[in-house]
Image (tube, grey):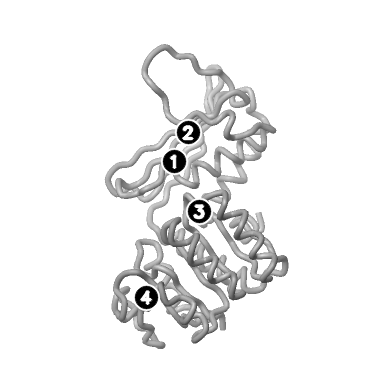
Amino acid sequence: MIKLLILGPTGTTSKLISKLALIDQEIDVVAACDITNIGGDLGFLIGVKDPNNIKINDVDDLRDIINKTHPDVAVDFTVAQATEKNCVICVENGIRCVIGTTALSEGFFTTFEELVKKNKAPAVISPNMATGVNILFKMASILTKYLAEWDIEVLEAHHNRKIDAPSGTAMKIGQIISETLGSNFEDIAKFGRSRGPNKRSVGAKNEIGIHSIRAGDIIGDHTILYAGLGERIELRHQAHSRECFANGALKAIKFITTAKENKIYSTSEVLGL
Protein backbone atom coordinates (compact mmCIF):
# COMPACT_ATOMS: atom_id res chain seq x y z
CA MET A 1 0.00 0.00 0.00
CA ILE A 2 1.15 3.51 -0.83
CA LYS A 3 0.95 5.75 2.23
CA LEU A 4 -0.30 9.09 0.93
CA LEU A 5 -0.27 12.61 2.37
CA ILE A 6 -2.67 15.04 0.69
CA LEU A 7 -1.88 18.75 0.85
CA GLY A 8 -4.88 21.05 0.38
CA PRO A 9 -7.35 18.13 0.13
CA THR A 10 -10.52 20.17 -0.32
CA GLY A 11 -9.34 22.37 -3.20
CA THR A 12 -11.17 22.13 -6.51
CA THR A 13 -8.97 19.47 -8.10
CA SER A 14 -7.58 18.11 -4.84
CA LYS A 15 -11.08 17.14 -3.74
CA LEU A 16 -11.33 14.78 -6.71
CA ILE A 17 -7.85 13.42 -6.03
CA SER A 18 -8.87 12.82 -2.41
CA LYS A 19 -12.00 10.93 -3.50
CA LEU A 20 -10.11 8.71 -5.91
CA ALA A 21 -7.33 8.07 -3.40
CA LEU A 22 -9.74 7.07 -0.62
CA ILE A 23 -11.39 4.39 -2.76
CA ASP A 24 -8.23 3.12 -4.46
CA GLN A 25 -7.16 -0.33 -3.25
CA GLU A 26 -3.46 0.47 -3.70
CA ILE A 27 -3.47 3.72 -1.69
CA ASP A 28 -3.74 4.34 2.04
CA VAL A 29 -4.42 8.00 2.85
CA VAL A 30 -2.59 8.54 6.13
CA ALA A 31 -2.84 12.33 6.51
CA ALA A 32 -4.31 15.51 5.04
CA CYS A 33 -3.13 19.07 5.73
CA ASP A 34 -4.68 22.42 4.89
CA ILE A 35 -5.19 25.99 6.06
CA THR A 36 -9.00 25.59 6.18
CA ASN A 37 -11.44 22.99 7.54
CA ILE A 38 -8.87 22.10 10.24
CA GLY A 39 -10.24 19.34 12.46
CA GLY A 40 -12.87 18.44 9.90
CA ASP A 41 -13.45 14.88 8.71
CA LEU A 42 -11.94 14.42 5.23
CA GLY A 43 -14.45 11.83 4.07
CA PHE A 44 -17.42 13.93 5.19
CA LEU A 45 -16.07 17.08 3.50
CA ILE A 46 -15.60 15.39 0.13
CA GLY A 47 -18.59 13.05 0.32
CA VAL A 48 -16.78 9.69 0.47
CA LYS A 49 -16.66 7.02 3.15
CA ASP A 50 -13.22 7.25 4.73
CA PRO A 51 -12.08 3.97 6.34
CA ASN A 52 -9.33 5.77 8.27
CA ASN A 53 -11.49 8.68 9.48
CA ILE A 54 -8.75 11.13 8.54
CA LYS A 55 -8.99 14.53 10.20
CA ILE A 56 -7.61 17.57 8.39
CA ASN A 57 -4.55 18.90 10.16
CA ASP A 58 -3.11 22.40 10.21
CA VAL A 59 -0.42 22.55 7.52
CA ASP A 60 1.71 24.60 9.92
CA ASP A 61 2.15 21.33 11.82
CA LEU A 62 3.37 19.50 8.70
CA ARG A 63 6.68 18.31 10.17
CA ASP A 64 4.92 16.75 13.17
CA ILE A 65 2.32 15.10 10.94
CA ILE A 66 5.06 13.59 8.78
CA ASN A 67 6.84 12.22 11.85
CA LYS A 68 3.62 10.63 13.10
CA THR A 69 2.28 9.15 9.84
CA HIS A 70 5.43 8.43 7.76
CA PRO A 71 3.90 8.94 4.28
CA ASP A 72 5.61 7.57 1.16
CA VAL A 73 4.20 10.19 -1.21
CA ALA A 74 2.75 13.70 -0.90
CA VAL A 75 0.41 15.15 -3.53
CA ASP A 76 0.05 18.92 -3.88
CA PHE A 77 -2.32 20.80 -6.23
CA THR A 78 -2.52 24.03 -4.23
CA VAL A 79 -0.89 27.41 -4.94
CA ALA A 80 2.73 28.24 -5.64
CA GLN A 81 3.46 29.99 -2.34
CA ALA A 82 2.24 27.00 -0.34
CA THR A 83 3.79 24.34 -2.57
CA GLU A 84 7.21 25.97 -2.52
CA LYS A 85 7.20 25.81 1.27
CA ASN A 86 5.45 22.52 2.02
CA CYS A 87 6.92 20.29 -0.67
CA VAL A 88 10.42 21.34 0.39
CA ILE A 89 9.58 20.09 3.89
CA CYS A 90 8.31 16.83 2.41
CA VAL A 91 11.34 16.12 0.24
CA GLU A 92 13.69 17.03 3.10
CA ASN A 93 12.04 14.15 4.95
CA GLY A 94 12.55 11.76 2.04
CA ILE A 95 8.94 11.90 0.87
CA ARG A 96 8.32 11.59 -2.87
CA CYS A 97 6.13 14.37 -4.26
CA VAL A 98 3.53 14.69 -7.01
CA ILE A 99 3.03 18.38 -7.78
CA GLY A 100 0.38 19.82 -10.09
CA THR A 101 0.66 23.41 -8.88
CA THR A 102 1.38 26.00 -11.59
CA ALA A 103 3.31 29.31 -11.57
CA LEU A 104 6.18 27.83 -9.55
CA SER A 105 9.32 29.97 -9.52
CA GLU A 106 12.56 29.06 -11.26
CA GLY A 107 14.32 29.36 -7.91
CA PHE A 108 12.05 26.68 -6.48
CA PHE A 109 12.81 24.25 -9.32
CA THR A 110 16.55 24.69 -8.79
CA THR A 111 16.38 24.19 -5.02
CA PHE A 112 13.87 21.37 -5.23
CA GLU A 113 15.88 19.41 -7.81
CA GLU A 114 18.94 19.58 -5.55
CA LEU A 115 16.89 18.32 -2.60
CA VAL A 116 15.43 15.49 -4.69
CA LYS A 117 18.93 14.25 -5.46
CA LYS A 118 20.27 14.79 -1.96
CA ASN A 119 17.40 13.04 -0.20
CA LYS A 120 16.84 10.37 -2.86
CA ALA A 121 13.20 11.37 -3.19
CA PRO A 122 12.15 11.61 -6.86
CA ALA A 123 9.14 13.73 -7.81
CA VAL A 124 6.67 14.38 -10.58
CA ILE A 125 6.01 18.02 -11.44
CA SER A 126 3.66 18.87 -14.29
CA PRO A 127 1.45 21.85 -15.16
CA ASN A 128 -1.14 19.43 -16.51
CA MET A 129 -1.45 15.72 -15.73
CA ALA A 130 -4.30 14.92 -18.13
CA THR A 131 -3.38 12.15 -20.56
CA GLY A 132 -4.77 14.04 -23.56
CA VAL A 133 -2.81 17.20 -22.82
CA ASN A 134 0.44 15.28 -22.65
CA ILE A 135 -0.32 13.65 -25.99
CA LEU A 136 -0.96 17.21 -27.25
CA PHE A 137 2.54 18.16 -26.03
CA LYS A 138 3.97 15.23 -27.99
CA MET A 139 2.04 16.10 -31.16
CA ALA A 140 3.14 19.74 -30.92
CA SER A 141 6.80 18.70 -30.92
CA ILE A 142 6.20 16.57 -34.02
CA LEU A 143 4.15 19.08 -36.03
CA THR A 144 6.44 22.01 -35.25
CA LYS A 145 9.35 20.26 -36.98
CA TYR A 146 7.46 20.43 -40.28
CA LEU A 147 5.81 23.84 -39.83
CA ALA A 148 8.62 26.01 -38.49
CA GLU A 149 8.05 28.64 -41.19
CA TRP A 150 4.36 29.02 -40.38
CA ASP A 151 2.87 31.30 -37.74
CA ILE A 152 2.19 29.46 -34.47
CA GLU A 153 -0.17 30.85 -31.84
CA VAL A 154 -1.20 29.29 -28.51
CA LEU A 155 -4.64 30.12 -27.11
CA GLU A 156 -5.91 29.10 -23.67
CA ALA A 157 -9.18 29.67 -21.82
CA HIS A 158 -9.98 29.07 -18.13
CA HIS A 159 -12.54 30.03 -15.50
CA ASN A 160 -12.58 33.56 -14.11
CA ARG A 161 -11.11 32.49 -10.76
CA LYS A 162 -7.80 31.23 -12.16
CA ILE A 163 -4.99 33.31 -10.72
CA ASP A 164 -2.13 32.84 -13.18
CA ALA A 165 -2.12 33.81 -16.85
CA PRO A 166 -1.00 32.42 -19.19
CA SER A 167 -1.72 28.96 -17.84
CA GLY A 168 1.16 26.67 -16.97
CA THR A 169 -0.01 24.38 -19.77
CA ALA A 170 0.16 27.17 -22.36
CA MET A 171 3.63 28.10 -21.16
CA LYS A 172 4.70 24.46 -21.44
CA ILE A 173 3.37 24.30 -25.00
CA GLY A 174 5.30 27.45 -25.89
CA GLN A 175 8.47 26.02 -24.39
CA ILE A 176 8.07 22.74 -26.30
CA ILE A 177 7.59 24.61 -29.57
CA SER A 178 10.57 26.89 -29.00
CA GLU A 179 12.81 23.97 -28.00
CA THR A 180 11.79 22.13 -31.16
CA LEU A 181 12.72 25.23 -33.17
CA GLY A 182 16.03 25.58 -31.35
CA SER A 183 14.97 28.98 -30.02
CA ASN A 184 14.82 30.58 -26.57
CA PHE A 185 11.18 30.81 -25.48
CA GLU A 186 11.73 34.04 -23.56
CA ASP A 187 13.14 35.67 -26.70
CA ILE A 188 10.31 34.77 -29.08
CA ALA A 189 7.22 34.62 -26.81
CA LYS A 190 4.66 37.37 -27.50
CA PHE A 191 1.99 37.61 -24.81
CA GLY A 192 -1.23 39.00 -26.29
CA ARG A 193 -1.63 41.69 -28.91
CA SER A 194 -1.91 45.46 -28.57
CA ARG A 195 -3.91 47.81 -30.79
CA GLY A 196 -2.15 49.84 -33.42
CA PRO A 197 0.03 49.15 -36.47
CA ASN A 198 0.92 45.52 -36.98
CA LYS A 199 4.66 45.30 -36.42
CA ARG A 200 4.77 41.63 -35.60
CA SER A 201 7.41 39.28 -36.95
CA VAL A 202 6.07 36.54 -39.23
CA GLY A 203 6.96 32.90 -38.59
CA ALA A 204 7.34 30.85 -35.43
CA LYS A 205 11.12 31.15 -35.44
CA ASN A 206 10.63 34.86 -34.83
CA GLU A 207 7.54 34.91 -32.64
CA ILE A 208 5.07 32.63 -30.84
CA GLY A 209 1.85 34.28 -29.69
CA ILE A 210 0.44 33.26 -26.29
CA HIS A 211 -3.12 34.38 -25.51
CA SER A 212 -5.31 33.98 -22.41
CA ILE A 213 -9.06 34.14 -21.77
CA ARG A 214 -10.60 34.16 -18.28
CA ALA A 215 -14.37 33.68 -18.34
CA GLY A 216 -17.17 31.88 -16.54
CA ASP A 217 -16.51 28.33 -15.43
CA ILE A 218 -14.34 27.09 -18.30
CA ILE A 219 -12.32 24.20 -16.91
CA GLY A 220 -9.48 24.40 -19.41
CA ASP A 221 -9.18 24.75 -23.20
CA HIS A 222 -5.88 24.82 -25.09
CA THR A 223 -5.45 25.35 -28.82
CA ILE A 224 -2.28 25.43 -30.91
CA LEU A 225 -2.86 27.22 -34.21
CA TYR A 226 -0.47 26.56 -37.10
CA ALA A 227 -1.21 28.97 -39.95
CA GLY A 228 0.40 29.10 -43.39
CA LEU A 229 -0.62 30.69 -46.68
CA GLY A 230 -4.12 29.53 -47.59
CA GLU A 231 -4.35 26.85 -44.91
CA ARG A 232 -4.11 26.15 -41.19
CA ILE A 233 -3.98 23.29 -38.70
CA GLU A 234 -5.39 23.42 -35.18
CA LEU A 235 -4.55 21.09 -32.30
CA ARG A 236 -7.05 21.42 -29.46
CA HIS A 237 -7.60 19.89 -26.05
CA GLN A 238 -10.70 20.60 -23.98
CA ALA A 239 -11.14 19.41 -20.42
CA HIS A 240 -14.78 18.44 -19.84
CA SER A 241 -14.21 17.86 -16.13
CA ARG A 242 -11.35 17.97 -13.65
CA GLU A 243 -11.42 14.20 -13.38
CA CYS A 244 -8.82 14.01 -16.16
CA PHE A 245 -6.39 15.92 -13.91
CA ALA A 246 -7.23 13.80 -10.85
CA ASN A 247 -6.84 10.52 -12.75
CA GLY A 248 -3.47 11.73 -14.01
CA ALA A 249 -2.42 12.56 -10.48
CA LEU A 250 -3.19 9.03 -9.28
CA LYS A 251 -1.16 7.56 -12.14
CA ALA A 252 1.72 9.81 -11.09
CA ILE A 253 1.41 8.77 -7.43
CA LYS A 254 1.68 5.09 -8.36
CA PHE A 255 4.51 5.77 -10.83
CA ILE A 256 6.69 7.78 -8.46
CA THR A 257 6.47 5.13 -5.74
CA THR A 258 8.68 2.81 -7.80
CA ALA A 259 10.70 5.40 -9.77
CA LYS A 260 14.42 4.55 -9.70
CA GLU A 261 16.14 7.81 -10.72
CA ASN A 262 16.41 10.62 -8.20
CA LYS A 263 15.12 13.38 -10.46
CA ILE A 264 12.04 15.40 -11.37
CA TYR A 265 9.85 13.47 -13.80
CA SER A 266 7.25 14.84 -16.22
CA THR A 267 3.81 13.39 -16.90
CA SER A 268 5.05 12.42 -20.35
CA GLU A 269 7.51 10.09 -18.61
CA VAL A 270 4.76 8.77 -16.34
CA LEU A 271 2.75 7.86 -19.45
CA GLY A 272 5.72 6.50 -21.36
CA LEU A 273 5.48 9.11 -24.10
Whichever of callouts 1 and 4 sits on the residue coming sooner in the sequence is 4
Q: CA distance from mark 1 to mark 4?
A: 31 Å
First in sequence: mark 2 vs mark 1: 1
Amino acid marked by disc 2: Ile
Which residue is denoted by mark 3 in the rendering?
A: 128
**Residue position marked by numbered label 2 in the rendering:** 210
Q: Within the image, what quadrant is residue 39 found in?
A: bottom left
Q: Which image quarter: residue 45?
A: bottom left
**Residue depicted at 55% across the width and 44% down the height:** 172
Q: CA distance from mark 4 to mark 2?
A: 38 Å
CA distance for labels 1 and 3: 13 Å
Separation of disc 3 and disc 4 at Cα?
A: 27 Å
Q: Could you tell me which secondary element the residue under label 3 belongs to?
A: loop
Kindly identify which numbered label has been placed on residue 58: 4
Residue 187 in the image: state x and y as whole percent: 59, 29
* Residue found at x 46% / y 81%: 65
Quick one: label 3, few (<14), some, or many (20+) residues within 10 Å?
many
Earlier-in-chain disc, 3 versus 2 = 3
Foreground disc of the pair 1, 4:
4
SS for callout 2: strand
Residue 116 sits above or below residue 23 on the image = above
